[in-house]
Image (tube, coloured by chain):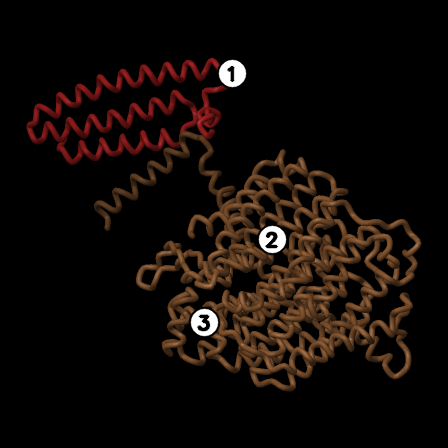
Amino acid sequence: MLPLALTVLAGPLGALALIGLVPPLRRSGRPAAFVAIAGTAVALMAAAALAAPFVTAAPPAPAAFELVWMPLGTVPAIPFGLLVDGLSASMAVLVALVALLVQVYSLAYMAGEPPSSLGRYFAYHALFAFAMLGLVLAHNLLQTYVCWELVGLGSYLLIGFWFDRPAAGRAALKAFWTTRLGDVGFALGIVVLWSAAGTFTFAELFAKASSGAIAGGALTLGMLGIYAGAMGKSAQAPLHVWLPDAMEGPTPVSALIHAATMVAAGVYLMIRVAPLLALTPAVAEAVFVIGVATALLGASMALVERDLKRILAHSTVSQLGFMMAAVGSGGAAAAYFHLLTHGFFKALLFLAAGSLIHAFHTNDIFSMGRAVRAMPVTSACFAAGALALAGILPASGFFSKDEVLAAVLAGGHPVGFAILVGTAALTAFYIGRALLIALVGAGSGASREAHDPPPAMTAPMLVLAVPALAFGIAGPTVSRLVAAPEEHAPVVVPILGTLAALGGAAAAWVAFRRGALEIRARGPLAPLIRALERRWYLDAPFEWGYRVLHAGVFRGIAWLDRYVVDGAVNALAWGTWGAAGRLRAIQNGRVQDALYAVAAGLVLLAWLAWGA
Amino acid sequence: MTAPALLLVASALFSIGLFGVLARRHAIAVLLSIELMFNAVNLAVVTVAWSRGWLAGVVLALFGIAITVAEIAVGLALVLLASRMPGRVLLDELSELDG
């Protein structure tokens, strides 16, 4: 299994090295793209081969490989290793599959880019794929953290890919800063756990925690830290503010990173450490509450958004909230199932949105319209994704959302359950609104000449549409992958879920079936709608904090660095320079001055020998 | 003359020579001063050898005189060369060694 696991990582890494280290290849554009795609394809095949044994009825035992990375003398050495179990292998398949499809899609979507930036784009993609697969396969926290930061770097580079647009640069910076805020907690959590348990390895941590070898306080603190990291990456409120802005990046990037993989990393991490979470009920409660709040918050903001990509971004925030709520109430398997289906259908929605944006040259849903007739393939794919997102039978989203709701109910959270059912209704409403306005409505763009994109773009969408619609049947398999007992939800859950979804969809139909009809900001709901449009005013504190930090603390630190740290160094240099300027007067080359020194030395020696 | 008196004369000669080396600017004067210091040392050697009855000391002094002569020949040759450059007989001006 080790060679396969290494191949998963070697594919994208090799592509990255080739594109990165051979400038002519990078500048050539499309050849670089093919190298990246080949690398990801290798990773996908290896990941599939890795995952295949785990979906059988008798899965093999998890396999861990480790090498000593940092020998530390008296304390246990820090290992570098790979963990192959049902969870990591199947997640690697999802990552590699979506990455491959998105890269193929990008071939056509990004065709207008100059060759050198195309090469750069695919180099970033290879970097991201490598980092994400490394994160998935990591067998200890430290390695996870390293890959976690690399994923953040890849995301930063790809959001800011069009760096000549100020908004893209700002969004990239905002994403980086916001996720970093959580990562500080992650780093502290790792340190706390390490100092309490003396290990970074998941398996050892689980063993020590369950045997009570880790103090309860340290465990809770460490888990809080790890959850802080997951909050940043998985856009949990209030750290969700970066995700909508991240839509400044190219749309395929949003599909890969900000829908299917990177934002799922936080949820994946929490699923990975679920055994520890089970021992820290306080943290689990926090994960649950914040998850529910995030689900509602994201869905509410998607209700009034006009930008198609941002609707999907808010929706991603909301769906991540669903997953976290499931993790927090002990339903790691349900969360993972929803992670997988969401990865498929949200990537599909983003790719379809990308081809709509490509055709209409705008992100505004009110400037699109009548795409059903002009772009049948895209419309069908978008509708499939919307069906899955809304959670309407028989699409995959129905099954996974059902499991999430069941897990929340089983975890003893009736209020959270009710909120999530309500959020499911909102979900159906906002995606129905987007679908009706963008695809059916007669917006200002409706008269324009729009058509389906080339096969390189439609093929990935069609491939993704299959699991988006049909992955629901894989529920029991997914439970087996994460070695969770299969649970049977009370029959009321799917009924309520379906009612909510259909209710939301029906409301959207009633409100928007005539197309370009907008909820007007007037009447008693006006302040609410304005708050929604301003995204609950949650961005302001972050921007204020960033500005104040920037203006105050960092300027102070910069001053300290310039005048105290650099000052000391410069003073030393100038002191040496000045002293040398004075001392060089001695070396004037006059024989007699030298002889004076000799004579003085002689006198000194004589005095030393006899005088003293 | 007794040995201490002779040694006193020798150290006086040496000091005068040292002063000349340090204070005079003309190369020939400096060479003469060096010669003075050499002779002071020779005188001291001979004095000690004579007072103790060591013949080896006198031989050493003879060698010293011979070496002094050779050294003065080299020194004069250098001064001669330096004097071919216009106005380069003063040691202050021969300061190329300062790099």
Say which amino acid is labelled 2.
Answer: Leu
Residue A239: mark in rendering:
none
Q: In this view, does B53 lie above or below A360?
A: above
Residue A97: mark in rendering:
2
Q: In which quarter of the image is residue A470?
A: bottom right
Residue B86: mark in rendering:
1
Q: Is residue A292 above or below residue A201?
A: below
* Residue positioned 50% across, 61% down in the render: A55
Mark toward the viewer: 1 or 3? 3
Circle 3 is placed at which residue position?
A192
Residue A271's x, y, as percent?
53, 69
* Residue positioned 13% across, 33% down in the render: B2
Mark toward the viewer: 2 or 1? 2
Residue toward you, A116 or A60:
A60
Question: Are the residues under marks 1 and 3 on the same chain?
Answer: no
Q: Quadrant of residue B38?
A: top left
* Residue positioned 90% across, 56% down in the render: A445
Say which amino acid is labelled 3.
Answer: Val
Which label's residue is closer to the chain start, 3 or 2? 2
Give the alpha-carbon distance from disc 1 to disc 3, as whole Å. 83 Å
Q: Mark 2 lies on which chain?
A: A
Give the alpha-carbon distance from disc 3 to disc 2, as whole Å. 35 Å
Residue B26's x, y, as percent?
42, 23
